[in-house]
Amino acid sequence: MPGGSATTTMTTMIAQDGESERPRSLTLTSRVVDGITVIAVDGLLDATTREEFAEFLSQAGPALILDLAGVTFMDSRALGLIVHRWQTTLSSGGRFALIGVDYARARVIWITGLAERLPLHDSLEEALAALA
C-alpha cells in the first residue's frame, strides 16, 4: 500500500433473518490507508442490510473511500445512504470516493444519473491520488 499506510480491520457479518446457517448477506471491512478510511462492502446492500450499513458508515472518519467491488446487489435505499454520506462528508470539508462500482451489480447508480455526479474511481490508488 502507498506511503506506509496503517491498517485497522473491523468486520461485521449479518445473516438474513437471523438464521446462522444461511450464507452471510453482508460483510463490511474497514481499514485506514494514508489517513483515509476504506470500507470494503461484500454482499447485498438492500433493505435487509440497510441499518447495519448505515451504522458502519456513521463510524467512518471525515475521509472515506467505499469499495463496492464485492457488492452483489444494491437497491435505492443503499444508494440513498451513500449519497447522504457523500453530501455530509463534502459539506463538512471531508473527502469521499467510490471504487469498484460495477454496472451489473449497482445499476441503480446509473439509472438515477448519479454515475455522472458521484466521485467514481477505478482503483484504490486512483482514489487515494484524487483525495490527496
Image (cartoon, grey):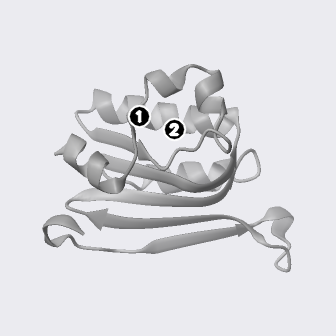
Which type of secondary structure does the marked residue at label 2 adopt? Answer: helix
> In the visual, does 89 lie left or right of 107?
left
Question: Does 28 appear above or below 75?
Answer: below
* Residue at left offset 43%, top offset 23%: 117
Res. 62 visible in picture = no
- Report x, y in % for residue 9: 41, 74
The reply to whether discs 2 and 1 touch (Cβ–Cβ < 8 Å) is yes
**Quadrant of the rendered image containing residue 31:** bottom left
User: What residue would you read off at disc 1?
Assistant: 86
Label 1 crowd bin: few (<14), some (14–19), many (20+), radius 10 Å: many
Distance, label 2 to label 1, CA atoms, is: 6 Å
Question: Does 89 appear above or below 34?
Answer: above
> In the visual, does 52 lie left or right of 6?
right
- Report x, y in % for residue 44: 70, 54
* Residue at left offset 56%, top offset 19%: 113
* Residue at left offset 38%, top offset 32%: 88
Res. 76 visible in picture = yes
Label 2 crowd bin: few (<14), some (14–19), many (20+), radius 10 Å: some
Question: In the rendering, which numbered label is found on residue 82?
Answer: 2
- Report x, y in % for residue 121: 38, 42
Which type of secondary structure does the marked residue at label 1 adopt? Answer: helix
Camera-nearest residue between 114 and 89: 114
For the N terminus, the quadrant is: bottom left
**Quadrant of the rendered image containing residue 15:** bottom right
Type of the residue with mark 1: Trp
Camera-nearest residue between 14 and 45: 45
Query: Please, which residue is most extreme toward the top here?
Result: 113
Question: Does 53 appear above or below 95?
Answer: below
* Residue at left offset 79%, top offset 73%: 23
Type of the residue with mark 2: Ile
> In the visual, does 69 lie left or right of 9?
right
